[in-house]
Image (cartoon, grey):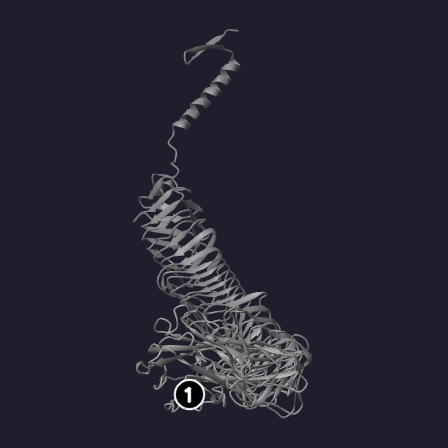
Amino acid sequence: MARMRLKINCFVLPVSLAARLALSFLLALSIGLAGLVLMPAPVRGATITSTGAGGNWNATTSWSPAQIPVAGDIVTIAVGSPITVNVASACASITVTGTLTITNNIALTVSGDVSGAGTITPSGKGSAINVGGNWSFSGTWTTTNRGIITFNGTGDQTVAGANTFRSVTVNKSAGTLFISGSLAIKGGSVTLTAGDINYSGTAQTLLNAAYPNSLTLFGSGAKTMGNAITSIGGNFTLSGTATATTKAALTVSGNLDVGSGTTFATGAGKGYTLSVTGTTSVTGTLTLANKGTKTFTGDVTLNSGGVWNETGIASIDLAGNLTNNATTFTANAGTHTFSGATKVISGSTTTSIANVAVTGTYTNNGTLSVSTALTGAGTLTNSGTGILNLSGAGAGSCAITTLTNAGIINRSAAGTTTTALANFTNTGTINITDSGAITGITNNAGGIVNHSGSSTITSFNNATSTSTLNISTTPTVPTITTLTATVAGNTVNYSGAGTQTVIATTYSNLTLSGSNAKTFPAGTTTVNGILSIESTATTTVTGTLSYGAAATLQYKGSAAQTTNSEFPSTFTGTGGVIINNASGITLGGSKTINYTLTLTSGIVTTGANTLSIASTGSVSGGSSSYVNGNLQKNVATGATSRTFEVGTASYYNPVTVAFGNVSVAGNLTVNSANGEHGNIATSAIDSSASVNAYWTMTQDGSLAFDNYTATFTFVSGEVDGGASTGLFIVGKYTGGWTYPTVGTRTSTTIQTTGLTAFSDFAVGQLNWLSYNDAERTVPDDIFGSPETTGYMRSVNLTSGALYHVTFYDADGGGGGFDDAHKKLVVDGVDGSNLDAQILFTTYMGTSDAGTWHAVVSYIGNIAPDTYDANWANALADHSFTVQADAIPEFSTIFAAIAVAGLCSAIYYWMKKKRLALVEV
């Protein structure tokens, strides 16, 4: 078989017939494919503009370039080149400056923006345009045939300009539709399937339908809501200066936020309800009008600058926390129900509500004022920072099941409180100023109830040691059918500024304060703790007042008090009696205290009465508080010491009596009186250099002892000016004066020892007297006794005692004594020997004119060689002057000191010339 060769592309191949046929087919196919590759194709994402006379969307002749627009293309409908969308079509964006017609039941899907100022005409109710981008078309949308526009982009979209549609659908899976222009619906419908919507323009009308997601009203002016806006599936937010008013019942499934400068109101005149499931925040104005119930399930926060205004009488239901810092809060007269569990009412603004029903559990941390009724089966706790004002006047004005107070409750109207005793508990302060009945109050730890009204209380329990009930109503105290005040430490205080009658019952601590008489009525009143009489209150006992074993009686007035029948003749309570009144206490009768007398402040004046401390008693305090009058103490056997906390009206002058040995116990009474002793003039004490007080000590007949030492205390303010306390002695007066041995002296105390009996005691310096003397008619060398005149005498010497009398010339070299001595000591002066004559001429030379001192001491104490004004053992130190013209004319002087009883006289004579002594 002959073979052929085919040359293709410079290759020559031998082929058979069959092969030639196959090769021919392949060649034809290759040429065809090459032709297809070489033909021009439409450009995707191209910019396509209608051209010529326009036409259908799916005709290439309608477009320039000549291709049918598809998704992703940028399309322009030119003027004079109208386009009819006759098949389902799509593009990335479209600008309509000419005319675009959408055939019935045909949809044009634009994934991006729609703009232009031409005309869009849906030709039937099934005509649709789906917009995924922004809408800024400002031309004409023909609404005759009910075309549908759907916004369904997955990101944020904007609708601008003034728009009127027949039907609108919003179905956004993500993003927000921002409507900055107007979007009116004419004769059609609105379908909101999904997506957040934000109206950001001025004076806009909202799409009238239920909003499936969040709705935001931004911008300014009124945002008109239609009657089909009945729900918002997400948050409802107002910001800028937008205002909006509902025209139907509205449910907000998310949060409601009324921003600063905005106003949101429920429509007036109808019963439109409002329900907010999420939180509510008000910084602008929220007006709740009409009679429809308003329900707030989440927390409600009213911020500074916010206004909460309830203009319609309707129920308000709150289930979350309420924080009220609003500038204005106005509630209606409807019931406000708080139903949340473990929620809080707080804020700086008073939450004033006429009717409150608590069905949940709430704590009030702010100020809650209820003017009509507080009811509900729940629990309201008024915390330590909370104030609860109850001013309801009707029956059941406070009928809440459980009311607990740790803050302040003010109850100020005639309404009744029916909360049970066990459920109305207080650890804060309750102020009752009204007349309504109260079923019961349990006053717990730290609780204070101030009752100044006339409210009757069926049962009141001061349940802990720190519970206090203050009753200030006068003259008739409120009725408390059952007053339980027996728990140790609790206090009931009758504090009225007027007369009051104490409820006859058993008290722990009972305080009578305020003013005027507090009467213990018929029946028995028992005080087991402290009976404290305070302020200017006084007592009257017409019934029986008794004290428990551990009772205390306290006087704590702000003015002078006088004890009355509240102070029994013997107070046996182990708490004793407390004096704590700076203005002082006067005993209304003689009293005995079996236990401690506590002197805290003020003076107890006994007058003719006696305040006695029993053998089991004691005294605590003193100095600023003491007894002015008769204080009696029991003296036990043995070497017993007792201090008596006594003083005058001005000064504290306690006495300590230490017994050597008490063989028979008994009582000793001590009194300190102001001024000089009535017989001081007959004593050896100088009244111008003494303590201006004296003491009286009296024992009862049973007290027997061997001796005692007494220490008397005085203060500088009652010591005469110029007196030297180091020279003080003690005078003891029992019909006459004796001078017991002085022990230790200080600037404010003096001790005397070896005493065996009690009487009056005075303290001061020795009394030296000067006399004018006539010239002797019979001069002699030896002074004789008795003499009827003398220049000076000492009345301090004790009869039978021996003394030194030492003379000093204070001006010069010994006063005429020789230089070896510079003094003259007259030894052995006997106070009982009137006729003693002592010559002291042995050491005399010539006498010097000037100041001399005569110093007296006990014979065992030797005076110093030279004069010492501060010598501690001086019993007396008297100065006198020797006149110059009295100097003797001879060198020898005889002198004698005559001592009789309490007196000693020192006489100086010269032969033929008198020696004159003048006291300095």
Toward the viewer: 568 or 339?
568
Placement of 828 over or under 198, stated as above or below? below
Q: Residue 427 location in percent, x, y? A: 58, 72
Toward the viewer: 792 or 774?
774
Amino acid type for the residue under numbered disc 1: Gly
Residue shown at the point (63%, 93%) measured from the top left: 542
Toward the viewer: 706 or 641?
706
Residue shown at the point (44%, 50%) measured from the top left: 153
Toward the viewer: 26 or 329?
329
Q: How many marks?
A: 1
Tell me: 639 left or right of 651.
right
Secondary structure found at label 1:
loop
Q: Residue furthest top?
A: 2
Circle 1 is placed at which residue position? 790
Could one spot residue 312 in this view of the protein? no
Q: Quadrant of residue 556?
A: bottom right
Q: Residue 761 location in percent, x, y? A: 54, 84
* Quadrant of image for the C terminus: bottom left
Placement of 755 over or under 386, stated as above or below? below
Tell me: 673 left or right of 699.
left
Q: Residue 327 location in percent, x, y? A: 41, 70
